[in-house]
Image (cartoon, coloured by chain):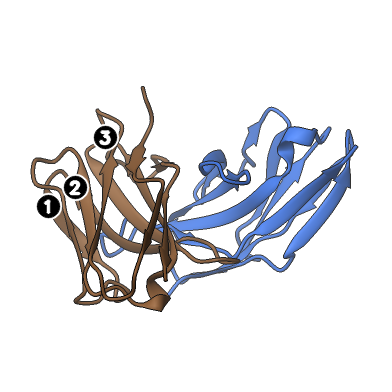
Amino acid sequence: DTGVSQDPRHKITKRGQNVTFRCDPISEHNRLYWYRQTLGQGPEFLTYFQNEAQLEKSRLLSDRFSAERPKGSFSTLEIQRTEQGDSAMYLCASSVQGANQPQHFGDGTRLSIL
Amino acid sequence: AQTVTQSQPEMSVQEAETVTLSCTYDTSESDYYLFWYKQPPSRQMILVIRQEAYKQQNATENRFSVNFQKAAKSFSLKISDSQLGDAAMYFCAYRGTQGGSEKLVFGKGTKLTVNP
């Protein structure tokens, strides 16, 4: 069990640019989640996948955000035309199926918009 | 919509002492799960303890235990024999079982400082 891996750890970009983050879940976990955490707040849910199917999206996930998990393994989160308000920590988590199963989090990708 | 409230933005405790972190939540569901996560500075969030709402017995994990009061919708975390390594942000989280939602709903967190 190597844990949930996220890349990059930190991304600095100019406003208006596109960015893409990657998440590699724990290998036997079929569920994968994305959260956003801003300073002084708890994580907020963005979206989740079961295998390759995206089953739930938050209203926080505007049209500029898109997430994929094409083969049911790793996932990418893309933000197009970044805005200042997108600056945050983006957390990925994974779990096995089951309502009582805990979600295991990665280290996160910190996005800074100049 | 479910909400989670952590009313203590910051708490401090002396090493080896006991501290209790508060959490309340609002839900109309009868079956759900509650979690406490720990997030050390610049490190990943890790699960501390979890509680199933259908279980009356409070969960314990070594020095960590909860006081789950379902009627009051309260879920506090007690840390006994506090250690320097316990210093972190602590987040209370709720997960419902209705409507197929798998998301965790988090509180704003409590920053715990452990003084030597």
Q: Residue drawn 65% across and 34% down?
A: B60
Residue A50's disc number: 2
* C-alpha separation, residue under disc 1 versus residue under disc 3: 14 Å
Q: Residue drawn 74% across and 65% down?
A: B8
Q: Secondary structure at mark 2?
A: strand
Say whether marks 1 and 3 touch (CB < 8 Å): no
**Nearest the eye: B75 or A79:** A79
Residue, disc 1: A53
* C-alpha separation, residue under disc 3 versus residue under disc 2: 9 Å
Q: Residue drawn 12% across and 52% down?
A: A53
Q: Locate the C terminus of chain B and report the quarter of the image it occupies.
A: top right
Say whether marks 1 and 2 touch (CB < 8 Å): yes
Chain B, hue in figure: blue
- Where is A105 relative to A41, above or below? above
Residue, disc 3: A29
Chain A, hue in figure: brown
Q: Amino acid at mark 1?
A: Ala
Q: Residue drawn 36% across and 36% down?
A: A4
Answer yes or no: are tags 3 and 2 on the same subunit. Answer: yes
Q: Amino acid at mark 2?
A: Gln
* Residue A95 x/y as whole percent: 33, 39
Q: Amino acid at mark 3?
A: His
